[in-house]
Image (cartoon, helix red, strand yellow):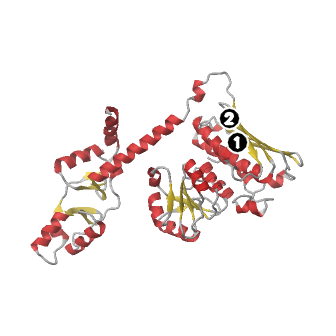
Amino acid sequence: MILREAIELLKADVQYNQSVQLEAEIHKARASDLMSEVLADDAVPDILLTGLCNSHVIRTASVFGIKAVVFVRGGPVDQKLIDCALDENIVVMTTRDSLFTSCGKLYAAGVRAVTENHNRRD
Amino acid sequence: METRLDKTLEILFELKVGDAMKKDVVTVGPDDAMGKLNEEMSIHRISGVPVVEGKKLAGIISISDLIAWLSAGVKDSKVKDWMVKDPQCLYADQPLIHAIKRFDQLRFGRFPVLDRESGELVGIITNGDIILGTLKKLEQDYNEEEVRRYRASHFFEDINADHLDLTLAFIITGKDFDHAGRASTTMKKNLKRLGLQPEIIRRAAIASYEAEMNVVIYTDGGTMKFTITDEKLTIIVKDRGPGIENIELAMQDGYTTAEPWVRELGFGAGMGLPNIKKCSDFMDLQSVVGEGTTLKLEIMIGVNDESKRINPEAKS
C-alpha cells in the first residue's frame, strides 16, 4: 500500500512537506519504543510506529532513513516535534488507535515486519 | 517555456501506460445482472466498467449502454447482452503518448489496460489519470533536480590537492536532551552534500548518533570530530567523564547502567556501543575513570572496493 492509504486506514492526523511523500510505498514496518533497538536492525522499515513522543524518534528516523513515523494513542505531539520532523523531511502522523490495533490494521492490509526475513527478535 | 514543454513531451514518452493507470479496477462479469452494474456504477461513481471473465477481458460497458438498457425497459438483462465486445485496449508497456493519441482518435472516456504477455486485465486509464501521472512525474523530477543542485558532490573533484583532509567538529552538551542528536543529523546532511554513498552516510549517521546520545546521557559533555579523506571517514568522540569502569562489559549486547529516565526517552537499552561497532570498520574505545572516554571510529569510503573493508560484518 502507499502511505496515503495507511493514513486513511489509521484515521491519522498527518504533517508533511510535499504531497509526493504520501505516495511512498509501504511494505515493511517496525513498532518499538526503544530507539536503540530500531537502530540496531539490519533493514530499514518504510514506517515506524511508536508510543514514544519526543524529537529523538524523529532524529532516529532521520539517522536511520525512515520516511514516516506513526505516533499511537493520540500522541501527544507538540509543535517542536512537528517542526523537527518537517525539518528532517519526515512524514509524521498521530492515530487514536493503540500500538497493537495500528499494527494489526497495517498487517491485515499486507504490511509486514521489517525483521520478517531475518533471524532477529521481533 | 519551450524547454518545459519539451520536458513534458519527454515524460509522455518515458512514462508507460502502466505507470499512470488505476490498478484497482472495478469489474463486472458477463453474466452479472444489469441491475448490479447500475449499483456498481453509482457506488464507485464511475461511467465505464470492464467486463471480465476469469482474468480475461470480455468486453466493456459504459453509462450509455446502461441508459440504452433502461430506456429499452427489458428486465432480467445480463451485462453480456449490452456490453461492447472486443473493446479497444491499451497495453501496460506502451508509452503514455500512445494512449493520448488513441484518446484523441477514438474519443473514448477510458481504455482497459492489458498485460501484453498474459493478455490479462491489469488496469484502466482515463484522460484524468494521464494528467495526474504526468504532473506527479514532473513534481518528482523537480524534487530530484532540487536535491541534485543542493548536493555538492563535485566538492572532492573541484578541490585539488595531493592529500585531502576535511575536519568538522561539534560540541556536545551533557544532559541537554533538547539538542541531543543535532551534531549527527547536521553531519548527515553535510555528508550528503559531499556526495558520499548513501550506505556509508547511513552507517556514519547511526554510529555518530549512538555515540552522541551516549555523551549526552552519561557524561558532562564533550566533542565530536569528523575527518574525511578520500579514503575514509574518521569520527572521534571525546567526553569529560565520568569514564567507563569496565569496557568489556559495556561492549556486551544488552548491558546498561542507564537510569529509568533515560529508558523513558527510548534509550539506554545497552545496544548503543555494540551497534556502533557493527556500523564501523574500525572501533577503538579508551576510557579512564574520573577523566573521560575517547571513542575512535573509522568507516572506509573507498565505496565499491570490498577489499578495503576491514570489518566484513559491517552492515550495509
In the rendered image, which quarter contains the C terminus of chain A? bottom right
Residue at horizontal 64 percent and vertical 36 percent from the top: B301
In percent of width and height, residue A119 lies at 63, 60
Dot 1: element: loop
* Residue furthest to the left: B72
Residue A23 visible in the picture: yes
Q: Quadrant of residue B250?
A: bottom right
Dot 2: element: strand
In screen coordinates, is B182 left or right of B248? Answer: left
- Mark-to-mark CA distance, 2 and 1: 10 Å
Residue B88 shows which numbered tag? Answer: none
Q: Mark 1 points at which residue?
A: B281
Q: Name the residue under label 2.
A: B232
Disc 1 residue type (three-letter): Asp
In percent of width and height, residue A69 lies at 56, 58
- Above or below: residue A75 compared with residue A66: below
| Pointers 2 and 1 in contact (C-beta within 8 Å) | yes
Q: How many labels does the image show?
A: 2
Residue B33 visible in the picture: no
* Residue furthest to the right: B290
Residue at horizontal 81 percent and vertical 50 percent from the top: B219
Structural crowding at the residue carrying mark 1, measured as other residues with C-alpha within 10 Å and reported as few (<14), some (14–19) or many (≥20): many
Disc 2 residue type (three-letter): Lys
In percent of width and height, residue B149 lies at 50, 34
